[in-house]
Image (cartoon, rainbow, N blue to C red):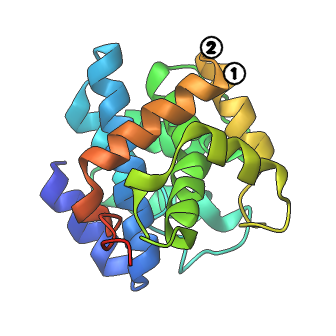
């Protein structure tokens, strides 16, 4: 499985532009961690890209990602990648053991949250997102209420990384790929 093949699977199953961008945002953060932790960047990136590919066809737990895993197995996706995808769902019963599994879980909800914060900035840019602002928004339960705050906190803890450090790391990663994520923003009025 290479990145191009993984992206084709995503595009085949995901029609929503926002869900495709979410896959790209998680991929961006996970690839940055792969470089930081000396992981296999290609494998880690493909895992992140595919982690929610079945969300539109299986939007309910426990169907996602369990039924999606079978589709990936039929497509020849490695057991390492499929296991990591299963482990990103707490209800799957697959414990997060490897660094890849822990990083995928830690980056999933946070990447979505950072994107949501970017969208409410006047510039709609990740470049205007900072750790203090993220911490403030985490306390606002009405903001991006679908984002599981416990997963963000627990993801950093499972990585054994201070939450602020993890947030800053993902912000920087996403800034580096802002144009592809649709988060470059516009000039301030």
Residue shown at 32%/18% (left/top)?
36
Task: Return the residue nearer the eye: 132 or 162.
Answer: 132
Q: Position of residue 139 (x, y in %)?
A: 83, 49
What percent of the width, then of the height, locates residue 28?
Answer: 33, 46
Look at mark 2 in the image and give the residue it sits on.
160
- Tell me, yes or no, if residue 36 can be seen here: yes
Give the Cα distance between marks 1 and 2. Answer: 5 Å
Left or right of 49: which side holds 22? Answer: right
Residue 144: percent from left, percent from top = 71, 67
User: Which of 181 and 168 lies nearest the eye of the viewer?
Assistant: 168
Quadrant of the rendered image containing residue 120: bottom right
Asked if residue 84 is positioned above or below residue 56 in the image, the reply reads: above
- Circle 2 Cα neighbour tier, 10 Å, few/some/many (<14 / 14–19 / ≥20): few
Kindly indicate the quadrant of the structure image that contains residue 34.
top left
Secondary structure under badge 1?
helix
Element type at mark 2: loop
In which quarter of the view is residue 30 placed?
Answer: top left
Q: Nearer the viewer, residue 167 or 12?
A: 167
The image shows residue 189, relative to residue 3, as above or below, that is: below
Q: Residues within 10 Å of mark 1 (few under 14, many from 20)?
A: some
Residue sitting at the far front: 189
Name the spot of residue 164 as percent of width and height, x first: 62, 27
Q: Tell me: residue 96, above or below residue 55.
A: above
Q: Identify the residue at image location x=43%, y=83%.
A: 16
User: Dots 1 and 2: beta carbons under 8 Å?
Assistant: yes
Q: Can residue 78 be seen by looking at this rendering?
A: no
| Position of residue 78 in the picture relative to residue 65 (left or right) | left
Per the rendering, the mark at residue 130 is none
- What's the mark number on residue 157? 1
**Quadrant occupied by the C terminus:** bottom left
Which residue of the protein is positioned furthest toward the bottom in this rendering? 15
Total residue callouts = 2
């Amino acid at each position: 499985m290479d990145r191009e093949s993984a992206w084709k699977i995503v595009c085949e199953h995901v029609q929503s532009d926002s869900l495709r961008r979410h896959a790209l945002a998680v991929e961006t953060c996970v690839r940055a961690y792969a470089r930081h932790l000396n992981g296999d960047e290609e494998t880690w990136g493909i895992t992140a890209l595919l982690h929610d590919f079945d969300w539109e066809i299986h939007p309910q737990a426990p169907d996602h990602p369990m039924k999606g895993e079978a589709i990936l197995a039929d497509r020849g996706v490695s057991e390492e990648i499929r296991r990591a995808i299963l482990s990103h769902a707490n209800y799957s019963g697959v414990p997060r053991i490897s660094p890849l599994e822990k990083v995928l879980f830690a980056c999933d909800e946070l990447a979505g949250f950072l994107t949501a914060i970017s969208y409410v900035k006047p510039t709609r840019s990740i470049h205007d997102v900072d750790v203090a602002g993220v911490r403030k928004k985490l306390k606002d339960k009405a903001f991006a209420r679908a984002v599981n705050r416990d997963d963000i906190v627990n993801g950093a803890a499972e990585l054994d990384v201070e939450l602020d450090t993890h947030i800053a790391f993902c912000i920087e990663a996403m800034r580096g790929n802002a144009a592809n994520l649709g988060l470059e923003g516009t000039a301030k009025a």
